[in-house]
Image (cartoon, rainbow, N blue to C red):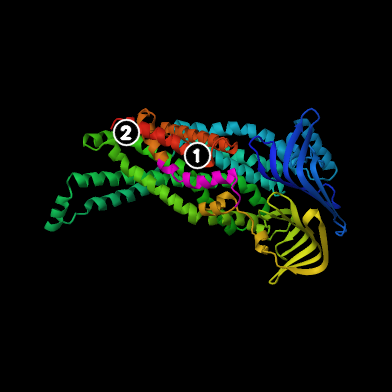
């Protein structure tokens, strides 16, 4: 275990080192040094950690009475380039790597030996079923393609995606049935192709021979009766006072408010449609990722629904900027294609005034996103992780799991080492506590076999307490059992650090050391919600300059280009921050600043 308090920008000079050499399990060897250097030799494949001005404290694990303290001005430690314990790689699915003939021979051999051969026969049929699926998809796509759709490319894209997703879900389910022995491998693997082929043949016959629409007559008759009732209603006459009030509200100001309400209503409709489509896509993708786990663990339906209920809000929050971008592009594409924007300009409403309600809605979404991020999102993400870990996988909560080989820094000058931490029993085994000075010199060391938390403090057994006095004189005090009043509480060790996505801005600001990765996450908590307003600002001029004949396909393309561009700029800025080439705050805001500038420039240069 190597702890470095500070690394120089050159990555060579190290300040404040604490190293625990645990390569010998019978000995506890801890090195503390004021400075250090990291030296590498590529020719000999050696890495040397050089310590300057420090000490080495050694004690035997079996006999804590034996202790050695050595001081040095320079000490070198060779670090292994390769791990001394090389784990043998085990292929989870070896049948996927075998050629066809070898796959058949291996299946026959395992069958004669009485071993499980189902995965091999499943893989054998998959190698033929998947190529045939291309023909089956063509059989389904042909009748869909020759039929006219009002939605054009958008409907064709949606249907194609739905067909592929449905096939994959059925294919994965049948593969799971085959692996569990509920269906023969050949039948299970070929069922999706057979069903899709039957659907394709039925659709092809319907497209060629036609389908009787007699069964729709009842529906159209009911629809006609409803229309007759609606048209037969007579409007009630307005009283004089109401007519006067409406007369006063039909001026230019009320007309502008009517247009605002119309634009906001259309914009909210696009946002609603985008949110529903996004929720469906998120659910489908998440199902594809977790379907194997569900088939293996078989959790109750309520737990599966709970998993999706907690997973959906966080994923929608991440995808909301894309939804806002698409909704803005589609709205202004529609206004441009239907000449509604030209009508607004002819009526004296400029582009800036027409865009104002849209930008206000996007700004409101940013405010709501900040509120959601700081209040509900951390708890929702934590609940989602708990459902996945505890209720589906059947594991203990993370804060109740026994942990081994833990190093914990409780303050600037205090380190804990625990061979085993038992959160349920509130106890530790193999405890070592180090107190050092601010220039990394060992002051006190406590070694104990066990430590049990109680209301009075820490009940420590079979321990040795050592103090380094003046002139590096070491005094030792052994004890069988003692209650120590250490400032650390058992909850300090049990409470785990949350992931950044389960923490709010205030929690990230107040918790943890000020490392670059967490600083970028901290400032991103403020910059990300503003993306919704920036996406709307950038989308408006891009939608206006798009060709009028592009339609929704052009809108999707424009949105993808903008989103990919934003992601590239944001990723590059974060990479610069990780390399200490940009401040963390500037890196988190770089993409917002760049795209806000681009959107503002294009917006101001557009014809109003």
Secondary structure state at the residue bearing disc 2: helix
Residue at the left extreme? 240
Image x and y of residue 467, in percent: 78, 59
Whether residue 492 is visible: yes
Report helix, strand or loop for mark 1.
helix
- In percent of width and height, residue 385 lies at 60, 54
Measure the alpha-carbon separation of dots 2 and 1.
37 Å
- The reply to whether residue 148 is visible in this rendering is no
Front in this rendered view, residue 200 or 250: 250
Q: Is 552 left or right of 477, judged from the image as shown? A: left
> Dividing the picture into quarters, in which one does residue 456 lie?
bottom right
Q: Which residues are magenta?
A: 512-533
Name the image quarter holding residue 52.
top right
Give the residue pinned by disc 2.
336
Q: Which residue is mark 1?
A: 586
Mark 2 burial class by Cα count in 10 Å: few <14, some 14-19, many 20+: some
């Amino acid at each position: 275990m190597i702890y470095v308090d500070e690394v120089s920008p050159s990555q060579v000079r190290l300040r404040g080192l604490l190293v625990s050499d645990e390569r010998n399990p019978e000995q506890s060897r801890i090195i503390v040094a004021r400075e250090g250097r990291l030296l590498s030799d590529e020719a000999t494949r050696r890495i040397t950690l050089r310590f300057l001005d420090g000490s080495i404290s050694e004690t035997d694990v079996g006999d804590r009475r034996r202790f050695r303290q050595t001081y040095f001005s320079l000490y070198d430690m060779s670090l292994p380039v390769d791990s001394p314990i090389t784990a043998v790689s085990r292929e989870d699915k070896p049948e996927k790597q075998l050629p066809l003939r070898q796959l058949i021979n291996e299946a026959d051999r395992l069958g004669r030996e009485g071993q499980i051969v189902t995965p091999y026969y499943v893989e054998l049929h998959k190698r033929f079923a998947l190529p045939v699926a291309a023909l089956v998809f063509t059989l389904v796509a042909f009748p869909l393609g020759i039929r006219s759709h009002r939605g054009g490319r958008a409907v064709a894209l949606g249907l194609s995606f739905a067909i592929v997703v449905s096939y994959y879900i059925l294919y994965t389910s049948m593969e799971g049935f085959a692996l569990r022995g509920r269906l023969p491998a050949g039948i299970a693997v070929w069922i999706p192709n057979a069903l899709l082929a039957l659907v394709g043949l039925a659709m092809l016959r319907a497209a060629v021979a036609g389908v009787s629409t007699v069964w729709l007559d009842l529906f159209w008759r009911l629809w006609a009766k409803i229309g007759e009732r609606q048209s037969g209603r007579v409007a009630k006459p307005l009283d004089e006072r109401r007519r006067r009030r409406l007369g006063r509200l039909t001026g230019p100001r009320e007309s502008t408010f009517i247009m605002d309400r119309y634009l906001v209503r259309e914009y909210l409709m696009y946002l609603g449609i985008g949110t529903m489509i996004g929720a469906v896509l998120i659910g489908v993708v998440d199902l594809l990722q977790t379907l194997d786990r569900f088939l293996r663990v078989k959790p109750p339906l309520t737990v599966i629904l709970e998993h999706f209920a907690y997973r959906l809000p966080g994923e929608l929050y991440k995808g909301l900027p894309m939804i806002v971008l698409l909704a803005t592009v589609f709205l202004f594409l529609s206004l441009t294609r239907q000449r509604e924007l030209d009508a607004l300009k002819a009526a004296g409403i400029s582009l800036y005034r027409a865009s104002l309600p849209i930008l206000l809605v996007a700004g409101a979404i940013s405010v709501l996103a900040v509120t959601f991020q700081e209040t509900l999102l951390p708890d929702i993400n934590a609940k989602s992780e708990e459902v996945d870990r505890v209720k589906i996988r059947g594991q203990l909560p993370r804060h109740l799991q026994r942990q081994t080989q833990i190093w914990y820094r409780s303050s600037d000058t205090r380190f804990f080492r625990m061979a085993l931490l038992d959160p349920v029993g509130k106890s530790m085994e193999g405890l070592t506590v180090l107190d050092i000075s601010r220039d990394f010199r060992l002051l006190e060391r406590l070694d104990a076999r066990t430590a049990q938390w109680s209301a009075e403090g820490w009940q420590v057994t079979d321990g040795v307490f050592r103090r380094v006095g003046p002139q590096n004189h070491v005094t030792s005090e052994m004890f069988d059992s003692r209650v120590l009043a250490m400032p650390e509480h058992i909850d300090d060790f049990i409470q785990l650090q949350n992931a950044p996505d389960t923490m709010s801005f205030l929690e990230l600001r107040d918790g943890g050391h000020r490392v670059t990765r967490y600083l970028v996450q901290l400032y991103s908590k403020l910059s990300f919600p503003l993306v919704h307003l920036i996406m709307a600002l950038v989308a408006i001029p891009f939608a206006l300059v798009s060709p009028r004949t592009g339609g929704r396909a052009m809108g999707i393309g424009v949105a993808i280009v903008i989103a990919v561009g934003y992601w590239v700029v944001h990723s590059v800025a974060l990479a610069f921050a990780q390399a200490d080439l940009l401040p963390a705050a500037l890196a988190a805001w770089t993409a917002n600043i760049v795209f806000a500038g681009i959107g503002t420039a294009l917006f101001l240069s557009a014809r109003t």
